[in-house]
Image: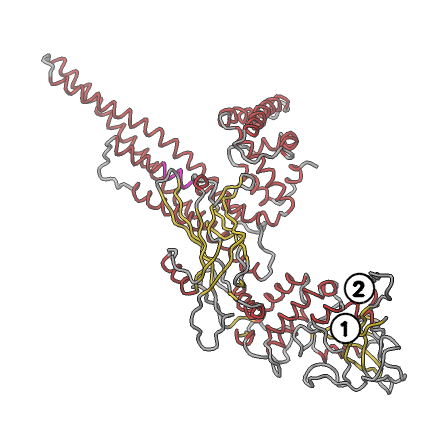
Amino acid sequence: MSLWARVNQLPPPVLEQIRYIYGNSFPIEVRHYLAEWIEDRLLNAPSYQHEQDAAYEQEAATFLNQLINELERTAINLPEDNVTGRIRLNESARNFRQLFSHNPSQLYSHLINCLQRERQCIAYPNECVNVQDPEIAEVINGLQELQMLVRVSENDNRNLVKDYEHLQLEIHEITKNKALLENLDNAALREHARTTLAQQERQVNEMVNLITGKRLQLVENFRKTIQLTSQVQEKVLHKYLTNWKINQGFAGNGASGMSASNLDTIQAWCESLAEIIWNTKDQIRLAMKNKQKLNIEEPNLPDFLPQSLVEVTNLLKALITTTFIIEKQPPQVMKTNTRFAATVRLLIGNTLNIRMSNPLVRVSIISEAQAQATQQSNKASEQSCGEIMNNTGNLEYNETTKQLSVSFRNMQLKKIKRAEKKGTESVMDEKFALLFQSSFAVGHGDLVFSVWTISLPVVVIVHGNQEPQSWATITWDNAFADINRVPFHVPDKVSWNLLAEALNTKYRASTGRSMTQENMHFLCEKAFRANLQFPVSDDLTITWSQFCKEPLPDRTFTFWEWFYAAMKVTREHLRGPWNDGSIVGFIHKTKAEDYLLKCPRGTFLLRFSDSELGGITIAWVNESNDGQPQILHIQPFTAKNFAIRLLSDRIRDFEDLYYLYPNKPKKEAFDRYTSPPVPSRNRNYIPSEVRAVLMGPSNNNNSTINSYPNTPNSYNHLQSPDASRDTPSSGYQNSTIMHL
């Protein structure tokens, strides 16, 4: 199936988006009738480093000639009753010859980009546009209407200049005739001349009235264009671009809503707006210039052109300053003397000749107070509170991606100046940001703009043990920051359900699988230190202090520290079993015991320890001395244990474990993650391996709970070193021994 055939199966809003991308200069009918011909030549077209290459220009010229010939041939071969199609194709052939003969690479590169966009839309249709959003069509239709208004204004302005010039000739003729009239002695000739002059003056007055009407219509078109441009620009910048920026914060917590194609679509809209605004600005200046040059007076008529020029310039300023964005945010937890990267992009860089100057971008780090001052004054500050190496770069235009951007790949924060702390504040609560700033001229250098943008907040640390609390600060900020806030204010209290969703998003991004509703309800009860009904109300709120400042009952760590440690050990050591659903993880000890009491001996499940940060314990069903089921808990494993022997290997070692809850054989659940046998490196030595064993009291069958019968059982009465931890009273511990 051809690419075009697959495109036509996409939802209508996506099709409308593709039609808009092709633009008015390339009718969609041409794409339809010449679908296979275009794809044969462009889908695998040779790539060139620069569009200015002679070979590229030759390729483009050849393609244009072949395209025109193919259009004319296709038009002839269309059925006789398809008159509209024939007219459209022949008209397109003439237009292509007229518009692109002097610059065939313009059409050639445009079509290649359009085909690339079609491929993106087929692969990710929901990312090209939100198919449920009717305002997408409003933006596209608005841009198309604006492009038509600009063309009408250009034509009317051009015709008005001709009318002015004709009027000047007529006025000059009247002036000459008046001079002749004064020198005439013959009464009859004088009367005839006077009559002719009066008739000329009436015609000039009619011409003035006609020109005045045309000029007022032109001014009205300017005002209509500015009004509609303002509406469309408001939607593009303050809805779609703002939403994209909001999603950057959510993406910092692991959300997957970010899409390069979304930003490419917004860039296409912004570039169209830039061209519309600039052309309108040029037309207004031309109208003002012609009016002044031709000395046309229009008494009792207000002159709206100066105000229109101010309004359109303000639109241009808002567009340019808002579309200077951070495409790739710097790391939000930033360690000193560690390399980091970031990318900034100017969404209108392909217009207004900006790309020709390669503007310089400077990066500095600023405090929360400096960020507030920058936002309030709308002017980038020269102050900074730290030193960043490799902090300058030039915006460069990429011919392939059509983007004007700069990537800072080797920045490094050398030092930081902190503010004085208040109350219980710590360095992990203090927020900074990177400030990117640049300046450049647009058009032909007659307007210079200074642009700046501030990154998402960052927390600066000097040691890895500061990471957990720093990520608490960033996670809360990313989830609950308002886009129009004063930097970097966040609410002190939020809905638990919103926080739970943020934690779930972060956990899924870190480990590969979401938590269950039961898992999140467990987290809720843990955070609030209470038993709560399921589901919890949206009115239930949690404070910042409960989240990451107040220790859990009888513990030395907070809820966030416990959650972060569980997420870290899962990501680094338990990812496979977690993604398979083999780890329950977030469950109360008592509820785990209730589940297991209904299961046969040897059934087990895995849950995160309440007492050990980053610990995971195995609870399983055994038999007590009287033959009754007994739930036992193995001392929690941590990352240090997994560095010695994997969880799956330990489960394989424990022969008393048979079934993963509820009834899955442990081999089926964990064998794929066990370590393969390691061959001996030297045949002169007997190989050895590390295995895990259980050390505990004998069961009712007088056998030791022990994975290997030759293991000494002289440790039957060892107890947990901490009586408050969630290991059982019977004191089962795990250990490792070396078997030869």
Q: Residue at x 78, y 63 (%)?
A: 673
Amino acid found under the numbered disc labelled 1: Leu
Using the image, determine if residue 367 lies above or below residue 116.
below
Residue 627 in the figure: left or right of residue 313:
right
Point out the image quarter for the C terminus.
Answer: bottom right
Spatial CA span between label 2 and label 1: 17 Å
Question: Is residue 277 one of those drawn in magenta?
Answer: yes
Amino acid, disc 2: Thr
- Looking at the image, residue 71 sits to the left or right of residue 273; the answer is right
> Is residue 354 placed above or below 497 in the rendered structure?
above
Which residue is found at the position 64% from the left and 44% from the top?
122
Q: Is residue 512 magenta?
A: no
Circle 1: element type = strand
Residue 340: give x, y in percent of width and height: 54, 57
Residue carrying label 2: 674
The residues colored magenta run 276-282
Residue 543 visible in the current orientation: yes
How would you classify the magenta stretch by its main secondary structure? Answer: helix
Give coordinates of residue 607: x percent, y percent.
Answer: 72, 73
Mark 1 nearby-residue class (10 Å; few <14, some 14–19, many ≥20): many
Q: Name the quadrant containing residue 633.
A: bottom right
Q: Quick check: 670 left or right of 700? A: left
The residue where tag 1 is placed is: 605
